[in-house]
Image (tube, rainbow, N blue to C red):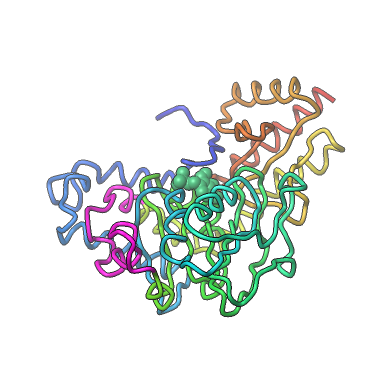
Amino acid sequence: NFKKVYNFNAGPAALPLAALQKAQAEFLDFNGTGMSIMELSHRSKEYEAVHNQAIELLKDLMAIPAGYDVLFLQGGASLQFAMTPMNFLPAGKKAGYAMTGVWSEKAYAEAEKLGEVFVAASAKAGNYCSIPAVEELQYDEAAAYLHITSNNTIFGTQWQNFPETGSVPLIADMSSDILSKPFDVSKFALIYAGAQKNLGPSGVTVVIIRRDFMEQANKQVPTMLRYGTYAKDNSLYNTPPTFSIYMVKLILEWVKAQGGVAAIHKRNQEKAALIYQAIDSSEGFYVGHAEPEARSLMNVTFRLANEGLEKKFLDQAKKEGFVGLPGHRLVGGCRASTYNAVPYESCQALQELMLAFHKENA
Ligand code: PMP
């Protein structure tokens, strides 16, 4: 019995109620151990079972091929910006970055500190409202890797198809759209994602890495910054964030119960469509930031005619129980994050609010 809100936070974000309730039910006594999962040793068989189930569920749900490892790290996606070049950008090679928003810029800036980088494509000139066509990506066979940000959380754009990079390893920051749609993992050498949007709470970063790629990593990197350290000990070299991983397991079970990633994707399309329809039918009252062909199913970004009207809209939304709708501090406007666990009903309510507010303020 609590105040229900429509949670459109960008991350940490809404989690499935069923998973939260399961955690609540098990909170004080996990599986008859007489203690909370948080109080169990990470070397206990009870914890290890949870840990391994989380890995197996992710492999199953994402159809991760043999030859890949699923790792649990800390430091967020932000640490991955540095770890990827530390491990995979040797002297004499160059890494290519597709610039599609603030997070790509941050990834590029970290790599630039560690080695040679180049811009493979950039959508900056249009204020990141588009995604480069895969054919536009410029790199050659000698590149150390190509890095993309699959979904741009702040600008609300998303790659609709992924490049075929042949022998050049493809690395993706999938923090804000992992597990939101089916795709072919085998195109990628490495995928990373902070958990706090589609996978669970903050505190754990998931890495999916191709083993033969991992073996090419720089051997001089300190222990905790090497992917191999995590792979060798099943992400139990040191103490992992056990409670976050436990929550990831519960959320993956929920995804499975929803019918898996294909079913979740269909729902995500329906959810985002409700909000994009409100934008498109408004005759310019609401203006979407992303070009229609680059629209994200995870973060719907839009503006109103002026800041005064935007403030009025956001104030009214807040009064009616909508949370997280103001846009990122760097770009302003409005943003509705519609991750996997955001209910269809929340998106319906937002559509209704947008239509009513338009009518009242046209
Ligand atoms: N990449 C993307 C696409 C993101 O959306 C975010 C966080 N919003 C980050 C990286 C940074 O993640 P973290 O806070 O886990 O370091």
Q: Residue at x 29, y 49 (%)?
A: 241
Q: Quadrant of the C terminus?
A: top right
Q: Is residue 305 left or right of residue 249?
A: right
Q: Residue at x 74, y 42 (%)?
A: 289
Between 359 and 50, the one nearer to me in the picture: 50
Considering every residue shown, the one lying at the far right of the view is: 283
Q: Is residue 77 left or right of residue 225?
A: right
Instruction: Pinpoint residue 99: horizontal percent, then vertical percent.
Output: 65, 54
Considering every residue shown, the one lying at the far front of the view is: 92
First to last magenta residue range: 218-247
Quick check: can you spot residue 323?
A: yes
Instruction: Pinpoint residue 9: horizontal percent, then vertical percent.
Output: 53, 37
Q: Quadrant of the N terminus?
A: top left
Q: Is residue 221 shown in magenta?
A: yes
Quick check: can you spot residue 341?
A: no
Instruction: Pinpoint residue 25: horizontal percent, then vertical percent.
Output: 27, 43
Q: Is residue 262 shown in magenta?
A: no
Q: Residue at x 76, y 56 (%)?
A: 293
Q: Is residue 123 left or right of residue 234?
A: right
Between 204 and 268, the one nearer to me in the picture: 204
Query: Hey, which quadrant is residue 94 in on the image?
Result: bottom right
> Height in image: 226 above or below 33?
below
